[in-house]
Image (spheres, rainbow, N blue to C red):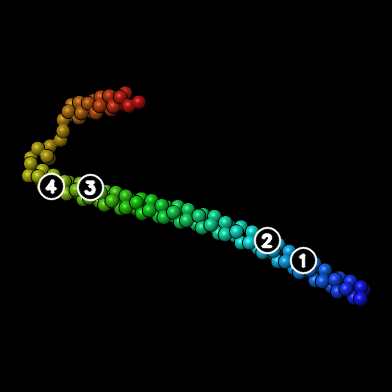
């Protein structure tokens, strides 16, 4: 009977060792996969932050492009307005000068020379004042 108890105890010890090994394997597996899960969660959070940052940059870029387009459109409209205003002034001056007899006369050469000298004086003053 002593041998029978020994065999029975061996089986019990082997069963306890086997169960202990299974519990150890399960706890190691749970810890390993939990750590992997936490790493993946951290990776997901980091990627979500990068996505938000990229989205913010894209929104700002689109906003800047829209502002530049609006500025270009306003500038283009202003240029067209100035051109129309200039054409209207030319038409107005032509109509006003059509019936004036002095408009058909030539400007005296001495007056032209004095105007050119005055123009050169203004250019020289402006050029010397510029840094």
* First in residue order: circle 4 vs circle 2: 2
Task: Tell which tag, 3 or 4, sits nearer the viewer.
Answer: 3
**Of residues 102 and 72, the one drawn nearer to the viewer in this rendering:** 72
Q: Residues within 10 Å of mark 4 (few under 14, many from 20)?
A: few
Secondary element at tag 4:
helix
Left or right: 109 as drawn, with respect to 40: left
* First in residue order: circle 2 vs circle 1: 1
* First in residue order: circle 4 vs circle 1: 1
For the residues labelled 3 and 1, the Cα–Cα distance comes to: 91 Å
**Of residues 99 and 4, the one drawn nearer to the viewer in this rendering:** 4
* First in residue order: circle 3 vs circle 1: 1
For the residues labelled 3 and 2, the Cα–Cα distance comes to: 75 Å
Q: Does residue 55 sit above or below 114 in this rendering? A: below
Q: Residues within 10 Å of mark 2 (few under 14, many from 20)?
A: few
Residue at horizontal 61 percent and vertical 61 percent from the top: 37
User: Which residue lies under the disc numbered 4?
Assistant: 92
Left or right: 14 as drawn, with respect to 104: right
Secondary element at tag 2:
helix
- Residue 82's label in the rendered image is 3
Q: Residues within 10 Å of mark 1 (few under 14, many from 20)?
A: few
Q: Quadrant of the C terminus?
A: top left
Task: Tell which tag, 3 or 1, sits nearer the viewer.
Answer: 1
Q: Does residue 33 sit above or below 78 in this rendering? A: below
User: Which residue lies under the disc numbered 1?
Assistant: 21
- Residue 32's label in the rendered image is 2
Left or right: 22 as drawn, with respect to 49: right
């Amino acid at each position: 009977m002593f041998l029978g108890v020994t065999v029975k105890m061996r089986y019990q010890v082997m069963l306890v060792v086997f169960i202990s090994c299974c519990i150890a394997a399960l706890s190691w597996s749970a810890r390993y996969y939990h750590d992997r899960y936490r790493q993946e969660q951290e990776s997901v959070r980091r990627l979500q932050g990068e996505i938000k940052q990229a989205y913010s940059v894209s929104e700002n870029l689109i906003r800047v492009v829209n502002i530049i387009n609006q500025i270009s459109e306003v500038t283009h409209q202003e240029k067209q307005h100035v051109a129309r205003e200039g054409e209207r002034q030319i038409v107005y001056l032509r109509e006003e000068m059509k019936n004036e007899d002095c408009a058909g006369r030539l400007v005296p050469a001495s007056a032209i020379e004095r105007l050119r000298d005055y123009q050169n004086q203004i250019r020289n003053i402006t050029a010397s004042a510029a840094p």
